[in-house]
Amino acid sequence: MFIIKKRINSILIWSVISAAFIGPGTLAASSSAGALFKYDLVWALLFAVFACIILQEMSARISIITGHGLSSVLKQNLRRKPAMVIGAAVVLGCAAYEAGNILGSVAGFLVLVKMNQRLLLIIIGLIVFLLLTYGGQNAIIKVLGTMVFLMGALFIFVALSGTHSIGQFFNGTIPNLPRGSQWVTLALIGTTIVPYNIYLGSGLSHGQSLGEMRFGLAISVVVGGVISIAILVAATQIDKVDSFLDLAKLLGDSHGPWAYWLMGLGLFAAGFTSSITAPMAAGMITSGLFEDRIKSKEISYRAGWSIVLLIGLFFGLLDVKPVPIIVAAQALNGFILPFLGIFLLVVVNDKKQMKGHVNSAYMNLVSFVVLEVLLLLGLNGLWNAMNNIINLSLENNFVKFIIIQSIAFICLLYTGYFIYRKRTV
């Protein structure tokens, strides 16, 4: 009975990761994938879930074995300034997306009840503030865990209410890139694996054993993946969707008002949970970065999440998304994610730091496959960001792929070299 209780508690703790990546952006990407390409991109979500588990497990394992959070480990291995730059960039990403999270929760709630949008936004912001201030981590985990499983039940119910082809679904689990699907595929993977979740998972692992962590993490991330796939499956019933709310309206027309209301409730839950996890992650990052400068870690933790929440509320009240900040954050996070992947892979192969818990040969092989995809994602994001500044467009996409792949291959070679040094010293 005690073991079962610990397992359930571990699932609840790690449901925070699912709550973090199941936000308005993920719902929009999954909706577009299902409406435009039907079941063909199910494999992309399966890969994203798999890669998410691999990266989160490495981050959590490092924290459990070393006794330090990811920010502290970065400082110890890279020195303070690089760790500060990386942490600041990830916090910027949290702040940039917070407005979208809050506005998403507002949009979902307005499907259920009609009221003043700004007043509702302030109420939601106040609830998030009170939870982060007075709720404590256990209370927050219970709220997020409950809402994640509620989202899962809602979206799965709507997805199963339509007529679907089992054969086409399983065909969609085979990697395939239909014409014009590259950007949607990148969005599916990029919204599931985000840098601030790696920091968040590092903080959540405190006090857990490796077995508890792995069990809870795997179950919770898989649940998050099932939710994303359920949205994709639901969207296959329509031919075009411009937003998640469009999907809700179209399903409402075909299934009845109940489908519209359930999708609205799901959007509210997704936005609300992400509105909590983004500031929470920012607080964990700042507390780790300034733990040796500020006497109380609680002060830096509160400062981190307060700044992110206030920025989100500010842009939310203006009813605009901070597009330039979001573009900058996407470019920075696109670069930081593969860098964090390389860093994690090198550290988990360091015999001195990991004390006998280094990666196996199989785990290294799997991690290199994940890292390859992260490098392609990150380099492609940087290419597009640079293209907005100077013209880097190429008529032949194959040439662009060869350039990006060549850079990725060099990064993989250097990573392999550093791993070899760490394992042989």
Image (cartoon, rainbow, N blue to C red):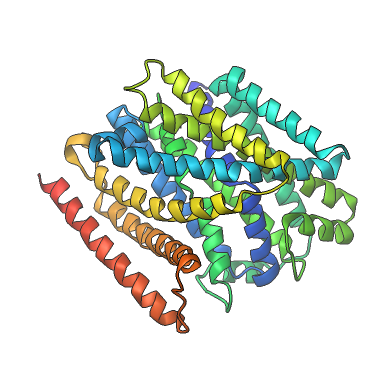
Residue 389: image location, x then y, percent: 47, 65
Q: How many marks?
A: 0
Residue at 48% x, 48% y: name it: 194
Residue 40 occupies quadrant: bottom right
Which quadrant does the C terminus fall into? Answer: top left
Residue at 67% x, 45% y: name it: 152
Q: Decide which of 6, 176 is in the foreground and name it.
A: 176
Residue 45: image location, x then y, percent: 55, 58
Q: Decide which of 411, 269 is in the foreground and name it.
A: 411
176 on left or right of 116: left
274 is higher (above) or lower (below) than 52: above
Q: Decide which of 386, 214 is in the foreground and name it.
A: 386
Q: Is residue 223 visible?
A: no
Residue 58: image location, x then y, percent: 35, 43
Q: Residue furthest left?
A: 425
Q: Is residue 399 visible?
A: yes
Residue at 67% x, 43% y: name it: 270
66 on left or right of 270: left
127 on left or right of 419: right
Residue at 25% x, 34% y: name it: 76
Residue 99 occupies quadrant: top right
Q: Residue furthest bottom?
A: 396
Residue 113 occupies quadrant: top right
Q: Residue furthest front?
A: 390
Residue 153: image location, x then y, percent: 71, 44
Q: Decide which of 150, 113 is in the foreground and name it.
A: 113
